Image: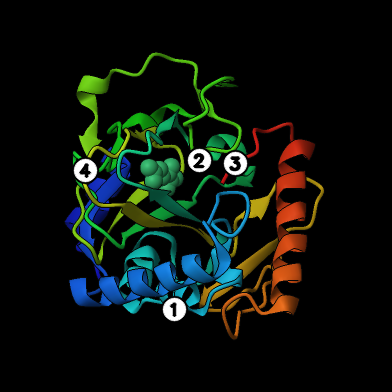
């Protein structure tokens, strides 16, 4: 075990999540947040589907977060030592902006087999009850993939297609994954999760990194890309991704746009909801 204990691994397998774990100090998280906010001043708001998606291809500071050793040690303890990033999202809720994430499972639109993807959610600001932390339904990952449908007209939903599980979720069972800046949570690809609006005075900022083992493959026909962050890729299910050298270098911006088009196109091909 590199970062988490056998008891914590049991907890993850039984409950479908693990939280909180330490990735970095609050001061380090603040420094990453400052770098993010510099980018917002330079490039404008970071939006999902644009620069807030697969941002590790655009910004060296995001690339750096994804290579945090404590984070990768915990992920390795769960999925093994050969680790790829499948996708990544900057989940930014500004104070009082009303944004929320409806109950959903990542596996319902990722199109991956086997369903061994794990999301690490790294807090760059306080993720609390007031700021709309991620909530998860314990043991919901044991029931397979639920039907999802598109919630039209819900403009504040952060998932691009506003998809949500059809089943009524018993919210009294939800666990709030409270995080200080620099801490992270882990959730299973089949765990039902979501979050409420930010009612705090500060922004709520999280980096959601979807990790897979290199043995996991995409089930559609499109050939997708993935970023190897640890170990060796002996399978070649994904084309390697190119790391950014500086924020939004023009050739990297066009590379990112091409990768995103391919990624979102692949969801349509599978008839899955466009997401993250
Ligand atoms: O940040 C949120 O509120 C939701 C995050 C989420 O859906 C995810 O990381 O998979």
Q: Secondary structure beneath disc 1? A: helix
Q: Tell me whether the residue at label 4 lies in contact with that at label 2, contact meaning CB atoms closer than 8 angstroms.
A: no
Horizontal relation, residue 149 to residue 120: left or right: right
Q: Residue at x 37, y 33 (%)?
A: 98
Residue 118 at what x, y percent from top left?
A: 43, 53
Asked which quadrant contains residue 137, the reply is top left
Q: Secondary structure beneath disc 2? A: loop
Q: Quadrant of ligand 1?
A: top left
Q: Residue at x 22, y 39 (%)?
A: 176
Return the residue at label 3: 275
Distance of label 4 from label 3 (alpha carbons): 26 Å
- The front one of 78 and 262 is 262
Front of the two marks 4 and 2: 4
Return the residue at label 1: 64
With respect to residue 87, does 239 lie above or below? below
Residue 117 at what x, y percent from top left?
A: 49, 51
Return the residue at label 4: 200
Q: Quarter holding the N terminus?
A: bottom left
Residue 79 at what x, y percent from top left?
A: 43, 60
Classify 10 Å Cα crowding around label 4: few (below 14), some (14-19), many (20 and above): some
With respect to residue 64, does 187 lie above or below? above
Return the residue at label 2: 106
Q: Residue at x 67, y 77 (%)?
A: 242
Q: Residue at x 21, y 35 (%)?
A: 175
The CB of the residue at mark 2 lies under 8 Å from ligand 1: yes
Classify 10 Å Cα crowding around label 1: few (below 14), some (14-19), many (20 and above): few
Distance of label 1 from label 4 (alpha carbons): 28 Å
């Amino acid at each position: 075990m590199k970062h988490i204990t056998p008891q914590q691994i049991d907890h993850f397998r039984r409950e479908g999540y693990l939280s909180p774990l330490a990735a970095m100090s609050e001061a380090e998280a603040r420094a990453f947040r400052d770098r993010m906010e510099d980018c917002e001043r330079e490039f404008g708001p970071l939006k999902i589907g644009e620069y807030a998606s697969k941002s590790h291809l655009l910004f060296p500071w995001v690339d750096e977060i994804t290579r945090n050793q404590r984070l990768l040690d915990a992920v390795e303890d769960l999925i093994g030592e050969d680790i790829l990033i499948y996708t990544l999202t900057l989940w930014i809720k500004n104070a009082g902006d009303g944004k929320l994430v409806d109950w959903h499972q990542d596996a319902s639109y990722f199109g991956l087999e086997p369903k061994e993807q794990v999301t690490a959610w790294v807090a760059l600001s306080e993720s609390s009850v007031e700021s709309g932390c991620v909530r998860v339904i314990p043991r919901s990952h044991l029931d397979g993939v639920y039907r999802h449908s598109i919630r039209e007209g819900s403009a504040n939903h952060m998932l691009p297609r506003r998809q949500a599980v059809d089943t009524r979720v018993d919210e009294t069972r939800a666990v709030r994954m409270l995080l200080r800046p620099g801490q992270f949570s882990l959730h299973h690809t089949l765990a039902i999760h979501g979050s409420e609006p930010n009612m705090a005075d500060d922004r709520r900022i999280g980096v959601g990194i979807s990790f897979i083992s290199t043995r996991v493959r995409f089930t559609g026909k499109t050939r997708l890309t993935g970023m190897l962050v640890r170990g060796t890729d002996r399978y070649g299910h994904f084309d390697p991704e190119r790391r950014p050298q500086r924020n939004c270098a023009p050739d990297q911006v066009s590379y990112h746009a091409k990768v995103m088009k391919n990624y979102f196109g692949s969801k349509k091909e599978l008839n899955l909801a466009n997401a993250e």
